Image (cartoon, rainbow, N blue to C red):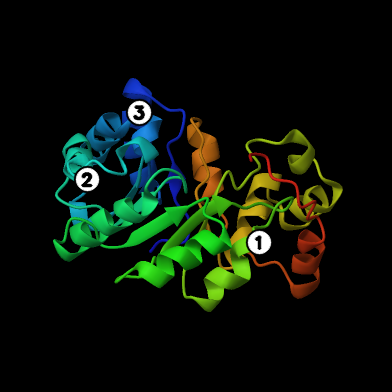
Amino acid sequence: IPQLGFGTIQQFDKQIEDNVAFALNNGYELIDTANRYGNEVEVGKGLKLSGLKREDYFLETKLGPTLYENDQAIDDTLKRLGVDYVDVMILHHPVNNYIYAYKMLEKAYKEGKIKAIGLSNFRVEQIQEILDQCEIPPMIMQVECHPYYPAEHVYDFCKEHHIQLQSWYPLGHGNKELLENETIVSLAKKYNKNAGQIILRWIYQEGVISLPKSTNEERMKGNIDIFDFELNEEEMKAMQALDTNKPSHN
């Protein structure tokens, strides 16, 4: 799985078609969307607009909680995206009948419609509930993760159970205070990068996949330009010390 992807939340119509195509033609190999974003059709058009073959990119989407007992939901999702399979399908929230929904994902996995199963926003005890009942363990866990809230509540558990963490809102949803943090700004000056690139590099070195979202082409290119420098151990610890244990979202 690519270690940095392009998030598509709050992007619609022709804009998202163009952004997805631009991302795939400018270094991104992972596209993330969701039923609840309401843009899967446009994401699918962007995939085709890119001109890439299906096997040349990694596609993931999230099943919405209102569809957790809808046996047609996965096929409908593939139809909206215009693909035969997705690389990851994720349960978006731990509400409603998520056990039934997980069994739907397992069935689709066996049928080759999805290549990996994921969760999003689940607490440790809820992940354990899935592990206790599943045939196929979850492989991805999507969660809020950035320097002010580094997912420490699930990090160790997921690492122990070989569940790859992904970060939504890795830049703190554009949190001005985070992007202007003194530690981050000083590192940006040292490495001739911007604050966002420092944050994304830190998340990458923590072993977490980032899914930054932008509608600006220059920022999109900048967000993936993080592989030509490395934070040292002291700098990683300084970034870890920024933890406020306060999420942006409940």
Q: Earlier in the sequence, mark 1 or mark 2?
A: 2
Vertical relation: 115 (above or below) 167: below
As drawn, the residue found furthest toward the top would be: 13
- Per the image, label 3 sits on a secondary structure element best described as loop
Where residue 20 is drawn, which disc sits there? none
Q: CA distance from mark 1 to mark 3?
A: 29 Å
Q: Residue at x 41, y 61 (%)?
A: 2
Q: CA distance from mark 2 to mark 3?
A: 15 Å
Q: Earlier in the sequence, mark 1 or mark 3?
A: 3
Q: Earlier in the sequence, mark 2 or mark 3?
A: 3
* Residue 209 percent coordinates (x, y): 51, 59
Query: In the rendered view, does 239 fall on the left or right side of 209?
Result: right
Vertical relation: 223 (above or below) 158: above
Query: In the rendered view, does 218 fall on the left or right side of 49?
Result: right
Q: Which residue is mark 2?
A: 74
Q: Amino acid at mark 3?
A: Gly
Q: Is residue 228 visible?
A: no
How many discs appear?
Answer: 3
Where residue 153 is drawn, which disc sits there? 1
Q: Residue at x 68, y 54 (%)?
A: 198
Q: Which residue is mark 3?
A: 38
Q: CA distance from mark 1 to mark 2?
A: 30 Å
